[in-house]
Amino acid sequence: MSLYLQHVPSSEKDLLKQLINDYLGELYISKETKLCSKTVADYKYFNDYWSDVRRHPLFIIKSNEVVGFTLIRKLDNVYISIHEVAEFCILPKHRGKGYGNKAVEELLLHYPGYWRIQVYDRNKIAFLFWENVIENYAVRKITSKFEQRNETCIWQWVFVDN
């Protein structure tokens, strides 16, 4: 069975909370950033993913098993709409199997257009992953920049996938 994305129904919020708590704990322990929430309780917009049509909570599924998740939000301005990856995680036991790349292919298929990706500079694995994704899938990279935010540095890319 192939990998696919599945909207997280409100009945599965608790599972997503658990996965996000593990993910945020992993980021916090590895000292990726001082800015990230430590738990879902600190995650200001978590419940908005079920009430705001511009937000999409998605499980990444392979062979009927949750292998990861992503939170996507759509940002609208006067000129264009941009999809943004708020969170993206392949669960530790499923990493290194190509699931991340396949999940991104599915995201771009279901949400075509402009994208913005942000990665903390200390998260070298995520940086390399997203740089590779953008190299492989972007039709046109619009911006790539590095910026300082408080005590944390962030890489940001904006690109078009088709």
Image (cartoon, helix red, strand yellow):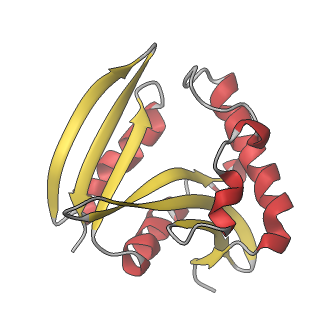
Towards the viewer: 98 or 114: 114
Q: Using the rendered image of the protein, determine whether residue 147 is visible from the camera's viewpoint.
A: yes
Asked whether residue 133 appears in the rendered view, the answer is: no
Quadrant assignment for the C terminus = bottom left
153 up-or-down from 142: above or below? above
Q: Residue at x 16, y 54 (%)?
A: 141
Looking at the image, is 83 positioned above or below residue 148? Answer: below
Q: Residue furthest front?
A: 78
| Rendered residue at 79%/52% (across/down) | 17
**Taking 107 as reference, is 66 left or right?**
right
Question: Is residue 121 rendered to the left or right of residue 159?
Answer: right
**Measuring 26% from the left and 28% from the top, which residue is drawn there?**
146
The answer to whether 79 appears left or right of 157 in the picture is: left
Farthest top residue?
151
Across and down, in percent, residue 124 comes to: 43, 31
Q: Position of residue 108 (x, y in %)?
A: 37, 72
Residue found at x 58% / y 19%: 34
List x then y, in percent, for residue 44. Answer: 66, 43
| Quadrant in the rendering for residue 63 | bottom right
Q: Dividing the image into 4 quarters, which one contains the N terminus?
A: bottom right
The correct choice, above or below, for 39 with respect to 96 in the image is: above
